[in-house]
Amino acid sequence: MKRLLNTLKLLVIWLIVLVAILEIFLRGADPFHFSVEGSKIKLNINYTERFTHQFRGIPPNPFKVYNDLGFQGPSAADSTGKLRIITVGGSTTNCDLISTPQTWPARLNVLLDSNRFWVNNAGFSGHTTFGHQIMLEDVVGRLRPDYVLFLTGANDRGISEIDKKDGYVLKGDPSSFNFTGKVVYYANQYSRFISTITNLSRAAKARKVINNYQGQYNPEDLVQSEPLPDSDVNKVLDRHRASFVPAYRERVAKLVETARALGIKPVLVTQPILFGDTTDADTKMSLARIRVDRDYSAWLGHPADHIDGLTESRILDLYNDAVRSVAAEKHVTLIDLATEMPKGLAYFYDPIHFTVKGCDTVASIIHQHLTKILY
């Protein structure tokens, strides 16, 4: 028994030494280039990232190029003497899996004339309006661009507050966390090793989601669903409308107020979606009846592991209506991309992310509206 205890003590000592060595190493090196560290956004400066995937409608080996600000786009030095625009949003602004030159902010920069305008892409995959607010306050606000374009809504559906399970990765008050949450929060703040473990876990989950999506939106693999009963649709819409949309509207309004307080002109952009009450131009498939895996069993009181495309579209439009309302109330330039963007598999490689053709179309629509206020 004594020998066993000594062995365990030795193992614990070696484990502590190993963790200490890794902590020191990770404080001096950045082998993974994660974009969140503790509760802070960590931008990767002068960094190129490469991917592989099997999604339809986009080149198979995309790359992201991050400049001296940690954004996609021309360098900070190139902004001298130009009108400066920064785009803020989630993965539909970052344009996940699309190479930097083909993203819609990059295409917008070309359309606007890069000799007169400077466009940088501060899209941050996974961010909700909570994250946009932090990006605006901590990063974009310091740069004082002339305009900020906010493309919001995709990640805010069903969210009314920062999720306490992941609250430690965003600014917030840890006093509301339970004991375990507080331990995780502070460990992530002060330990590079723990923060790395957290990010590796999150990256693995994200990769699993991406792998599950790959191939699902190939035309031959799409499943048509019967429309939900009107009573179920109304329950789902009413729950979003009552429990989540009002808080989202407040967060969008706060983005506008913060931007203006910083001397930045905000522009609001609504979020498009593949689905709607129409058919795909190429496949003639109904985009209203595509099956969307969403589990609303708890809300409806009976098994319901999916909805139809039209209902998914109507849900997102509740959040887009909130953006439209804020724009009207606060006299903000609105680009109603959700209304103007064509629907179809040629433009989206999954429900919300744009293909290369989709990015070109987004850039063209936004350019048409911006020319009215920039020239």
Image: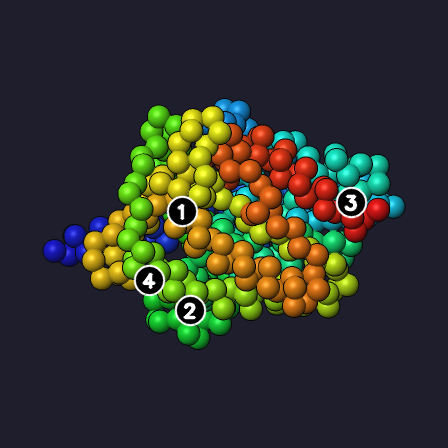
Residue 243, how many percent across, how many down? Answer: 41, 68
Q: State which mark lies toward you, 2 or 4.
A: 4
Question: Callout 1: 10 Å neighbours few (<14), some, many (20+)?
Answer: many
As drawn, the label of residue 242 is 2
SS at circle 4: helix
Residue hosting label 3 = 371
In the structure shown, which secondary structural element does the residue marked by tag 2 occupy? helix
Query: What's the amino acid at mark 1?
Result: Leu
Report the number of discs. Answer: 4
Disc on the earlier residue, 1 or 4: 4
Q: What residue sits right under mark 4 in the picture?
A: 235
Q: Residue 245, which numbered label?
A: none
The type of residue carrying mark 4 is Lys
Q: Quadrant of residue 74?
A: top right
In depth, the one of 142 and 198 nearer the eye is 142
- Where is residue 125 shown, x and y percent of the image? 52, 46
Residue drawn where x is 61% and y is 67% of the image: 254
Measure the C-alpha gap from mark 1 to mark 4.
Answer: 15 Å
How many other residues sit within 10 Å of disc 3, few (<14), some (14-19) or many (≥20)?
few
Q: Which mark is residue 310?
A: 1
Distance between mark 4 and mark 3 Cα atoms: 41 Å
Residue 261: quarter of image? bottom right
Horizontally, residue 187 falls left or right of residue 365, namely left
Farthest left residue in view: 1
Label 2 vs 1, first from the N-terminus: 2
Dot 3 or dot 1: first in sequence order is 1
- Say what amino acid the circle numbered 2 marks: Ala
Which is more foreground, mark 3 or mark 1? 1
Residue 17 at x, y percent in the picture: 39, 51
- Residue placed most toward the observer, 159 or 141: 159
| Residue 368 visible at all | yes
